[in-house]
Amino acid sequence: MAAPMMPDVRAPFAGLGGQTPETLFGALPTPCYILDETILRKNGEILAGVAQRTGCKILLAQKAFSNYDLYPVLEPYLAGTEASGLYEARLGAEEMPGKEVHVFCAAYRADEWDALLRYADHIVFNSPRQLQKFGPAAKAAGKSVGLRINPELSTQEGHAIYDPCAPGSRLGTTRAQWDEAVRVAPELPALLDGLHFHTLCEQDSDALESTLQVVGERFSDLLPQMRWLNFGGGHHITRADYDIPRLERCIRMAQEAWGVQVYLEPGEACALNAGYFATRVLDVLQNGETKIGVLDASAACHMPDVLEMPYRPPLYGAADAGEKAYTFRLGGPTCLAGDIIGDYSFDAPLQEGDLLLFGDMAIYTTCKNNTFNGMPLPAIYTRGENGVLRCLKQFGYADFKGRLGS
């Protein structure tokens, strides 16, 4: 078997408590997701500590984690939810009742607007045009209105297409765009209650500190007029080496300098390392020098961030290619040639039937997966704080067929 004798103590697998995947999850049908309630609660406690010490408010970005059956685990530690549109806003309102519901969308639809007003209490616009079009109605409905700004400071490297501050980005309003809009429509500033920026991705608070400085410089006249400032997401707050004291200094600086209520809306930080994805090897083959393991899991269908971001999920007991004795390329069973999870190395050769466990699989998985090629959706299990496994949801042929027609 490929599983090592020694436990994998890396953070994505710390919740296993030193037990092997086969011992814990060997009886489960694969592929399947396992959501760990203990880790979710630990993440919530860390986030709540930041909020309690600083007075900021922290929201769950549902685009990363929207398994609402587990919202009761996180709800005590959060001020509410953040949504990217009508359905997420409704989910947050229904599943965290009484909490705040914030929504940001690059462009809102007129035919959804009345419904959105029923669920959201903070509405953030992406452009001055959208603010002008929908802002007055939002204000009349008693909603708190914000504008997403683009500070034009890139803190990410190597993947400009994913960088909201890259030249030509569609996300957020630059200072030049705002000035031109106000020249034509001077009533716009009076519509605003807050500003929002989202520029980070899995980053530490040094990137936030740099961004906040530029935000303060470019929007210095607007900030003192605002009631709130939303730092967006991408803050890896619950990562073990994240600099929380620096984050808290940034929060206090904004509060003191501009008199605003600070919001953060992390997605990953809420569910970081709080999930696993179990899969088994269906076949082992070799093409030239490349050893290949074909799994019953698909990158394209079950962990799409592997192909979209790109993202390399941690794998229990495995290392990067060449680090251990046997390197295999892991791929899915679909017809897509690019359905490749990555190259990993193992202490022993993979064999048909081996159980593999990917870590950090609570985020951007169950909320993004699909049924390309007619691939079944994996079942979702929870691992309770007492260690008991419970089947949360199973899927079948009807889930595949039902989304394609009558």
Image (cartoon, rainbow, N blue to C red):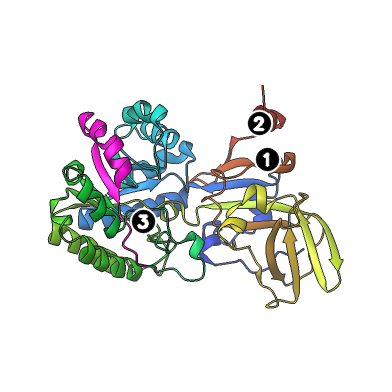
Q: Is residue 184 left or right of residue 113?
A: left
Residue that badge 2 annotates: 399
Residue 211 falls within the magenta-colored stretch: no
> Which image quadrant: the N terminus?
bottom right
Q: Is residue 257 left or right of residue 107?
A: left
- Could you say whether the residue bearing mark 1 is in a helix, strand or loop? loop
Residue that badge 1 annotates: 371
Q: Earlier in the sequence, mark 1 or mark 2?
A: 1
Q: Quadrant of residue 87?
A: top left
Q: Is residue 194 left or right of residue 2?
A: left
Residue toward you, 77 or 191: 191
Residue 132 falls within the magenta-colored stretch: yes
Q: Residue at x 79, y 54 (%)?
A: 353
Residue that badge 3 annotates: 198
CB under 8 Å between discs 1 and 2: yes
Give the image location of residue 118, x and y in percent.
Answer: 32, 27
Q: Which residues are magenta?
A: 128-153
Which amino acid lies under the numbered mark 2 shown in the image of this protein? Asp
Quote the CA–CA distance across marks 3 and 1.
30 Å
Give the image location of residue 225, x and y in percent.
Answer: 13, 51
